[in-house]
Image (spheres, grey):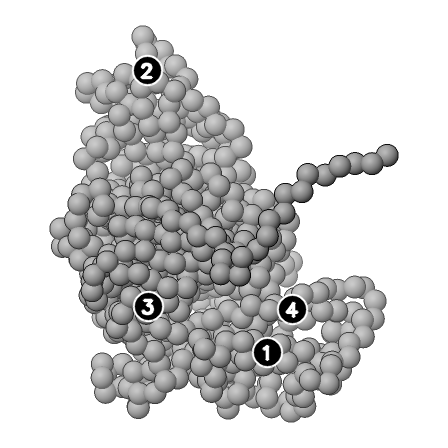
Amino acid sequence: MTTNFKNTSTMGVSARTHRRKTEQYDVVVCGGGLAGFCAAVAAARQGARTCLVQDRPVFGGNSSSEVRVTPHGAAAFHVYAKETGIISELLIEERARNHETVFENGWTNSVWDMTMYDMAQGTENLTFYLNTSIRDVRMANARNIASVIGYVANAELELELTADVFIDCTGDGIVADRAGCQWRMGSEGREEFGELHAPLEASGDVMGSSLLFKTKDLGRPAPFTAPDWAAKLDNPDFFYKQGRNPNDMRGGYWWIEIGVPWDTIYESEDIRHELTRYVLGVWDWIKNKDPLTKERAAHYALDWIGQVPGKRESRRIMGHYLMTSHDPLNNTVFEDEIAYGGWFLDLHTPGGLLAPTSEHASSEGYNETSDYMVKSYCGPYGIPLRSTIAKDVDNLMMAGRNISVTHAALGTVRVMGTTALVGQAVGTTAAIALRKGLALADMPSQAIRDVQQALLRDGCFLLNSSNEDELDLARSAQVAASSEAVCQSGEVRADLLAAGELGPQDDALRQRKGQWIAISESKLDRVSVCLTNRSGGPQTVKAVIVPVDHIWDYRTDELPALATTELLVLPGDYQWIDWDVRLDVRDGLKAGSFIRLDLHANPHIVWHCADGIVPGQPCAYEMGQGKMRRDWNGPTRSFRVEPAQYAYAPQHVINGVTRPYRYTNLWRSDPRLPLPQWLELSWEAPHTIRQVEITFPGSLLWEYRGYAPFYRDPQCPRDYRIEAWVGGEWEQLLAVKGNYQRHCRCTLEQPFHTDKLRIVIEATNGDPSAAIYEIRCYA
């Protein structure tokens, strides 16, 4: 049998090597890492016709399965500081879908890529091009970009994308560079801005790029022979005395890093090759040479080696404000704040593997109380909109590691959790500017409130702004609930401690430690702590109660004491030691605020952690120089208070803040009562309501890698319904099953006219209490 095929081939013409296409948008975002992705989604959600261009086959940049850097952010150093908004939606979704453990770098799989791809596909007003590199920029005039030129590598297609606003999230700042923007690259000298972290002399030094790898435990011997061209590493000091500890056989190792003497932009392929040589050399050392790791690594085989290095630094585009390291270290308050950060000033040693030592904190063994860590600990701090608006081109913004910061400040703002927040803010700003007909340069002075309120409504958090949306009907409502949890204690299960299941020695008072306690009443009669004294004789511990501004108020020397005493602790385990403080408003106690109970150092005494989390009430320890930092031994230390504090009132859901900050800001039902529990809004006159927006608790306490595969936060409501009061009874408007997202927008099928609305929480993902941070209602 003969089959005839239609001949559809065409003769090629040598002068025509590819096709060309021109498209027009409101906003074009160049670069699809977390900053660019969040910028594009935000602009599209705000109604702007948006195009996202990414030069790789997947979204995510350094976080993607091609590079596999774990997204870090403020939550690594500050409790309840997890980034929210679009990045939170993505990370919560990925953890709920993904079977893979995320322990550190190297373990990101394609489920993360597909989570981002799924969001992009489902976002109205968003068009995207993958495998598309920006080649050039065409200017309308000296100060305005007309279009960018992209090339789709596997389609022989040239794209010309025109727009009103362009956002450069390319990392290297290629759009800004081609448009003629001023940029900086390298390290500023200390004299220029007086930055403690800056080198004495300015140089072209930048942080390097890293190449990651992953291994697999085969359960049987897995030999490895390095190729001849792999790096030859034979000196234990290179690893153990220079901050390159091969501590985990599963892979990772951000310290496989190289930058200078190669140019991080123009010689990136040379850097990639050198990094590949070193990955193989490092694994050869671990598998075949190092007596400390050979046996541990015997059954591990290389499973994946990256071939796209994760880049940390190149061009930084000059904007209308240049952030220096003084801003994060001193928590500068910006009127045009649009995001926050909280990673430490993490400046990697230029040269990486070629330098005498690795990154400073690593070379010091991650000593959390070293001089370097103390002077580098910062935040949470605000980031200004002006640092994202190009100074030299009127319709260009930036997001990512290329924003307007010094080299020293880049050490903290460059991490992906932070850049994602900046990206969402920039995309939101671009769309609002177009809608209002304002120039980008005028947005910080003329429309910053609109930007901030839009970000808050979209699930973000800002340090110095709260919900003031005039359209939010919930703000004028009266609030009631079926029950209310009280805060009376953070208890200790002495049976587990006595059985050795928790190690009390880990919580010895080797330095000052503090516990935040929410105060709802202007009265505090007694506080108690659970202590162990194993010295064999009586010990005393200095105890102090100080007022604090918020949960990240880490000051120890500047705060006036409300009360001070010496606690006597006799020999013995798990003793509740009482302190009759008898504080009230005359002593400076303030309802609706936090105090911090501090115990000073006595290494013979253990202050036990509580069994479980008391929501919104964290603990910390002193790291030095009058400063505390989050305590990883437990989110809450043991304490009891009399009288009990009503720290989770229903009224918190309309106070405008959606996480613990200056107070708990959470409604929580009584955990002793069964679900369902409800929260009710009521008005003096009926309102028409079409949309209800709810912020639930969950996924704030730890950073991304602290959550398990298929994770759904127990505090987050799973099944809930929305009801309205109609004709003397409650009528169901909407029912949701299987929820695990924190920020939920519920659009009703028809607008509803009512003077009472309530949220009924039927089941959580594991917690005994129903809980809500915020409810908003819109017509």
User: Disc 1 to disc 3, how far (Cα)?
Assistant: 27 Å
Select label 4 or label 3 by which is in front.
3
Of the residues under marks 2 and 4, which one precedes in the sequence? 4
Q: Which mark is residue 725?
A: 2
Residue assigned mark 1: 273
Q: Quadrant of the N terminus?
A: top right
Characterize the local packing of mark 4: few (<14), some (14-19) or many (20 or more) Cα atoms within 10 angstroms.
Answer: some
| Residue for point 68% across, 71% down | 249
Of the residues under marks 1 and 4, which one precedes in the sequence? 1
User: Disc 2 to disc 1, how far (Cα)?
Assistant: 67 Å
Q: Is residue 347 left or right of residue 62?
A: left
Which residue of the protein is positioned furthest toward the top in this rendering?
Answer: 727
Q: Position of residue 559 (x, y in %)?
A: 23, 67
Residue assigned mark 3: 178
Badge 4 marks a residue whose secondary structure is: strand
Residue assigned mark 4: 305
Of the residues under marks 1 and 3, which one precedes in the sequence? 3
Q: In terms of depth relative to the viewer, which is nearer, 115 or 9? A: 9
Badge 3 marks a residue whose secondary structure is: helix
| Residue for point 39% across, 58% down | 149
Amino acid type, mark 2? Trp
Q: Are marks 1 and 3 in contact (CB under 8 Å)?
A: no
Of the residues under marks 2 and 3, which one precedes in the sequence? 3
User: Disc 2 to disc 4, how far (Cα)?
Assistant: 60 Å
Characterize the local packing of mark 1: few (<14), some (14-19) or many (20 or more) Cα atoms within 10 angstroms.
Answer: some
Q: Quadrant of the C terminus?
A: top left
Residue 623 in sight in this render: no
Amino acid type, mark 1? His
User: Disc 2 to disc 3, how far (Cα)?
Assistant: 60 Å
